[in-house]
Amino acid sequence: MPEADRSTNEPAQALAGLRVLEFSSAMAGPWIGRFLAWCGAEVIRVESRSRPDVVRLYVPPRNPELGTQPQLSPWFTDWNAGKQFVTLDLRQPLAVDIAKRLVARSDIVVENYSAGVMEKLGLGYQELERVNPDLIMLSSSGYGGTGPCSRYVTWGPNIEALSGMSRLSGFPSRDCTLTQYAYPDAISALHGMVAVLAALDHRSRGGGGQSIDLSQYEATVAGIGHVMMEHFALGQEPARLGNRSLHAAPHGCYPCRGEDRWCAVCVETDAQWQSFCSVLDRPEWQREPRFASLAARLDHAEELDREIAECTRDRDDDELMNALQEAGIAAGGVQNVEDLARHDAHLAARGFFEQVEHLVKGVVTATGVPLGLTGTPGRSGRAGAALGQDNDYVFETLLDMSGEEIECAVEAGAIESDGEF
Amino acid sequence: MSIGPPGALTGRRVLELADEKGAYCGKLLADLGADVIKLERPGGDRSRRTPPRIRTGSGPEESLSFLYMNTSKRGVTLDLQREEGRALFEKLASGADLVVETLAPGTLEGLGLGYQSLRQSNARLVVTSITGFGQTGPHRDFLSSDLVASAQGGAMHVTGEEEDPPVRLAGGQAHIAASSVAAVSSLAALLASSRRGEGQHVDISVQEVVASVSHICGVGKWLDDGIVPKRQGTGLFASVPSGAYPCRDGSVYLMVNRPAHWKALAEWVHEVTGTQEILDAMFEGPSSNRLPYREFLDLFILDLMSRLSVEEAYREGQRRHIAVTPVQTAATVAADPHLAARGFFQEVDHPTSGRLTYPGAPYRHSETPWRIYRPAPAVGQHNREVYCDELGISDATLRALGTGGVV
């Protein structure tokens, strides 16, 4: 939104007045702060030049000759728009001291360093609680803060495999099935936001501060808890259903005209089945005993899917979706990113994608934040911050450090003023 | 039911009028201590019949997903098509902090129970609506499902093998993610409501949630590299190497994302297989340096892993600080000593379904512990408690409502 449009009578944001301090890397931690910032919280992220975040190591794919470009990763925007950035070398006692002064003025600390790292730095909850008894501190790690594997190294896709998600998903012919989008990073970050906001709600109603231990492994298993229960209740490995359902048929993803075009369809009732046959122009199926009831269609799912695919192959996926929706059947084309960003009139009408101010690029388009707070609309703040972009604001204005004090901290290497980037 | 310390949301009251799109939202709030009252139509919601069911049953308390998704909630029945039912709903909403609902857009408004009506008697109320496509826009009345939302949000296109059709994740993840987002929004709106004295309507679109959780393959990346991401097996497009690699007795997932992890992996491969080539400096640095050699490098890793058991690859990889994890089944997750040491799985007694093991806390609060307060409610189990003891309706009136099919 242009600055002028929101200069007057800007509606309040849901988390205005809240300050969050982040010690984080990649997505699982930063995505939490990104959402909180979108809701109006002031989020300050602590970085170090000596151990840069992986997204800072970005080489622009269309201009590799530029080398590493720490401000340009699109994921850096997706995970960090709207935050303030400071650089502290936390191996220096003075830097830890400055970090604690920030903690004293914060409501929330979010960290996703490997388990145990914050304690080693002298920034564990036990320490920070002394500085700020009302602090809410979330620690997110692959396996959680306790247990024999708590120090293990993981990334999102590791958790997808570890949690059973990739083995339980997909077609039975495959050993395992993975997303290209590190789903556990997203689902565990969302759980982390729930945990933090619930603790904040508790505090706002008279409770105190506390620490929260989030295991990305456990949060992902919780999201397939009902599938896991088949193991416990029935003593068997849950069936891999692919796109099928135990209570609807046809229920699948059918090929359409064009390269890699598909339409997802769910037929739940017999009435919908009758309509479906009409839309597909196969009236003879309406009297076909193999497909006459849900039980019969489930029994003949293999041939059902094969025969439907023959009918959908020449249809446009968008046209088929509209025709089926018109007939009262849940259906939708399988959209790729170009479909979403360029052709989906519905998302466009809802203003889902955001134009975000970027310090290097001017403006970038980013995936929207789906929180839907209609009474306290959120927005994405500035993207593309450099390391230490906001050192002046945070150390001078917020912490009220004198010029001399800051100079000493820079000389001691506690505040990193320049370096590799 | 208040033995032990309160939960983070103890004292908050939530009405849940939700199918599979929103039941997990209610569970997240209820297991944190909120008093979540699940409103079902007389006879119980359809989700009570969702298969698979526990072996013995065909009744309304045997669906595993129903049992899991509705822990810690109370249950009442209510027919919103009836005037008396609507009056009860209004009364409940006037004393609630939050309503979570998943009806088609406009349904509650049509019954005179939309946000604008409910706020008249309760200005602080937050109403969170979870629908396939949201409350506005040309597709708002489109029918949705977990599969359709996974397709329309862009996630399926980038899940699975290139030569297979697009495929969704197990367990209805479009709805799990939408429920999680709805819980985040609801809590943010509750905090704002406490501060401002004014609630709001929260509009969650499952399609948008799916687009959001799959944003790594989203518009930012596409505009930057011009490549429309697609399915490409188990390896993540930006990380080399990454993927599932077969061992002697199963598979492990390995991912390298930092220069130091690559060096550690290259040394491991060298030590076990004797190859020198993998130590070449041209492969060092960030993943982008290795991108052109993904398949070549995979040959060495496949060789390494084929010599090891899953357990050996997992423990030795982690000893070397390399992100190696087993590709687990439900059975191995259930038997994982790490989860056992953390007490993750919980035993829950259900009066008709018996004692079952449930996955437990997705997060652990030090002062307000997460817990399962009670098993999923039976149909109308708390009608008397809620309607008579709390709303002050007489026993006779409740009986009349029951006879009339309102509850």
Image (cartoon, helix red, strand yellow):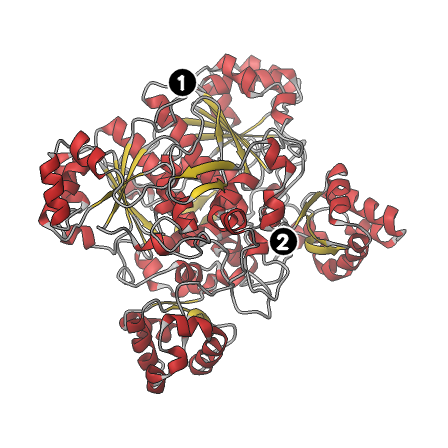
Badge 2 amino acid: Ala
Badge 1 amino acid: Gly
Classify mark 2: residues with Cα within 10 Å, few (<14), some (14-19) or many (20+): some
Residue A21's x, y, as percent? 49, 27
Residue A51's x, y, as percent? 66, 33
Q: Who is closer to the viewer here, B286 or A122?
A: A122
Q: Residue at x 52, y 58 (%)?
A: B222
Q: Is residue A77 visible?
A: no
Which chain is disc 1 placed on? A
- Labels 1 and 2 in the same subunit: no
Does B303 sit left or right of B140 as displayed? right
Residue A31's x, y, as percent? 49, 40
Q: Residue at x 61, y 66 (%)?
A: A173
The residue tagged 2 is B238
Tell me the SS state at disc 1: loop
Classify mark 1: residues with Cα within 10 Å, few (<14), some (14-19) or many (20+): some
Does A128 sit left or right of A134 as displayed? right
B51 to A222, vertically: above or below? below
Examine the image and state in which quarter residue B316 appears.
Answer: top right
Does A47 sit left or right of B94 as displayed? right
Q: How many marks?
A: 2
Residue B230's x, y, as percent? 55, 63
The residue tagged 1 is A208
Does B158 sit left or right of A332 as displayed? right
- Determine whether label 1 and label 2 are within 8 Å by CB: no
Q: Who is closer to the viewer here, B356 or B185?
A: B356
